[in-house]
Image (cartoon, helix red, strand yellow):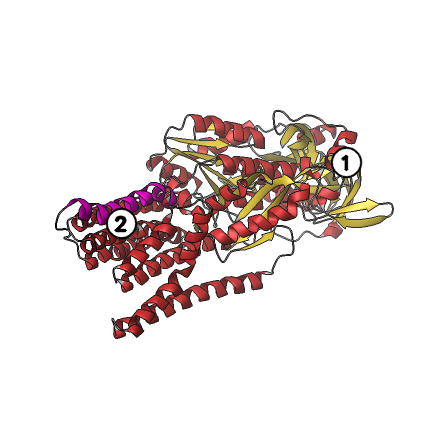
Amino acid sequence: MVLNNKVKDHHNNGCGMKEVVHSHENYTQEDMREYSDEEESHSYCSNHENTIKIELFIEGLHCSNCASKIERQVNALEEVEHATLNFATSTITIEMKKEEQHIVIEKASKIAIDVEPGVRVKEKGGIQKNKTEELEDKKKDNNRLLKRMGFSLAALAIAMFFKENTWGIASFIIGYLIIGADIIKRSISNIKRGEIFDENFLMTIATFAAIGVGEYPEAIMVMLLYQVGEYFEGRAVASSRKSIAKLMDIRPEYANLKIGKQIKKVSPDEVCVGEIIIVKPGEKVPLDGVVIEGTSSVDTKALTGEAVPQDLEDGDEITSGCINIDGVLTVKVTKAFKESAVSKILDLVQNASAKKAKTELSVTKFAKYYTPTVVFIAIIIAMIPPLFMKGQSFSDWILRGATFLVVSCPCALVISIPMSYFAGLGAASKNGVLVKGGNYLEALSKAGVMVFDKTGTLTEGQFKVYDIITTNGIDKETLVKFTAYVESFSTHPIAVSIVKEYGRETNKENIKNYKETRGKGVEADVEGMHIASGNSTFLKEKGIDIKESEEAGTIVYTAIDGKYAGYIIIKDIIKKDAKAAVEGLYQLGMNSIVMLTGDRKVTAHTVAHELGIENYKYGLLPNQKVEEVEILMKHKGEKKLVFVGDGINDAPVLARADVGVAMGGVGSDAAIEAADVVIMNDEPSKLIYAIKIAKATKNIVRQNIFLSISVKLGIMILAFFGRAPMWLAIFGDVGVSILAVFNAMRILKK
């Protein structure tokens, strides 16, 4: 989606300014071409397309490794042309032939449940459970896991009491199956599909080996600690998702289609090019089109990132995703939903997400090579020496092989790495920074290039009176008073900021002969004096000699009884902590700090200069921001690029960057959905804290990796020479896991 700038004099109920009005053009992608109404109707409204896309929501998916497996196996289905799973949103998008839709949904659902037992799969946009039901389901799942842990520990306690008799062994087996049955089932299921060597498989054979040599307690503890790690990792992911649960999808839910004299509420994708829709006050504009009847102001902040509403009248273009503010609009649809602004932005997000770097440290990737290696070595230890060395018994070397296998189980890594990231996520969330996954926290630790949007990110995103300049003997209070009176009929942000600056109630009875010149200004008689207020063109047309201001911001000029009284400067104020944020990021070693904005040059220069940002680009459209980020990505080296924004137009850039950071308080729904990190109180200085937490988390992860591998390697060598008793092997497995978890928890105190 590309927004083409065309500048025109704009005035909404008396607020004079120059405004960039956005009209939708049809060249989001280089190969996009214009379609005639007939072609578009045939392509997008006939409902005869052979290939379709569906979205499935996988509720309860908290394992990124499992998500990768689900995506890979769904892509392997012969009926599927392409599938992309977005772990951050638990959504898998599948492209297929229309007639095979039901088969694919059934198969994809089965794959998801087989890979990650306990998840629930449902079509997005279908009948959804209410929030209370979803919370109850999650609570039940957590309670079931906690009960299994409790029963398993109880069975272990009973077994330890009875020790080696029948009751003891039976209790051990029961406890083991209670806590480990789902892991065994998952391992078997993966083996059937060719996914042999993964952490589930190693967990299974390691515990089978422990049982085989009579070490029942260790088998239970291995499974139990693994489940504890998964539980906490799931809680971390759920916590991140919960923070954005209240945000709406930017996709419009419905369109008011006009059929004859009747209005029918339909899905936006059911509306064809050339049909008529009605957009009521407060509703989202569902499709791109042209206004054929009615006047209104539309809130474009979510789409353009700028706070100034846009006035529309007959003949003006209207873009989907805007919010209609105060009038009923009749719109002729010019683009089908598939080609609308909102749809294009969502596609950009999805395409950009596919380019996002994979997590560098993956337990599954490690297990892919580690697991078959240690299994092979364990078999060699158990079988080769007694076959080729005299006086060696099979039972002794099988025990050594089993001990080697137990200690080689990567439980410490499997548990401690997600726990380390969970601790980092928790430490960040306690301070208002929500990170959607450990991989983004890791990427933050390598941040080197910081790219900021301006409006709503470095600035407040709300208009305020910045300065009042008077002339010809008029004092500031008088200028503000009379300007506020003539602007008091408007709900426009500029007018509201002036009335707010006045700070008193305006008596409408004192206002006579009110008249608005659309796009220029207003005039009225106030307390017997004629007041004219608006842009420079408006006052010059009234024969009033004014000196135009070169100040950045919106300028509202006012004349009293035909005499120039002065002007008011309205600006989007820079956030209080923005300068401290920029200075702090430089001190953290950021290689480059860049500001990208759709605003005009003078405003961009003023903000950048005040904040100490040397590199900035202005007048950028959404796709141009992506292009600028692409250029920066090519020259960033090994460092990671972080983009910070808040508007819907920032969503593609947020997704394209190595780490996308959104402002959660004023940020748009799409930006937060596309972002990897959300700053809930809108303070950019929180980035400094987030990066420090990320670096500390990365250090602890390295410590845990070194601790796990070095201790295990040492015990493996001792096991080979028969110098490592089983209890030491259990320490190398369970003990190191516990130490690693405790080490991970240290970050909560930072």
Is residue 569 among the parts visible in the rendering?
A: no
Q: Secondary structure at mark 1?
A: loop
Verify CB contact (< 8 Å) between mark 1 and mark 2.
Answer: no
**Nearer to me, 715 or 57:** 715
Q: Position of residue 346 (x, y in %)?
A: 60, 39
Q: Secondary structure at mark 2?
A: helix
Q: Position of residue 50 (x, y in %)?
A: 69, 37
- Snapshot quadrant of residue 13: top right
Q: Dot 2, how many residues are within 10 Å of its Cα: few (below 14), some (14-19), or many (20+)? A: many
Q: Position of residue 260 (x, y in %)?
A: 87, 45
State the residue at coordinates (36%, 45%).
363
**Nearer to me, 741 or 594:** 741
**Quarter of the image containing the N terminus?**
top right
Stretch in magenta:
364-389
| Amino acid residing under circle 2 | Ser
State the residue at coordinates (39%, 40%).
444
Of mark 1 and mark 2, the one earlier in the sequence is: 1
The majority secondary structure of the magenta stretch comes to helix
**Nearer to me, 237 or 444:** 237
Is residue 576 among the parts visible in the rendering?
A: yes
Report which residue position mark 1 lands on.
273
**Residue 576 located left or right of residue 101:** left
Residue 526 shows which numbered tag?
Answer: none
Q: Position of residue 108 (x, y in %)?
A: 56, 48
Q: Nearer the viewer, mark 1 or mark 2?
A: 2
**Residue 245 located left or right of residue 19:** left
State the residue at coordinates (45%, 63%).
142
Report which residue position mark 2 lands on.
408
Marks 1/2: CA distance? 63 Å
**Residue 279 located left or right of residue 31:** right
Q: Decide whether residue 383 is among the magenta residues.
A: yes
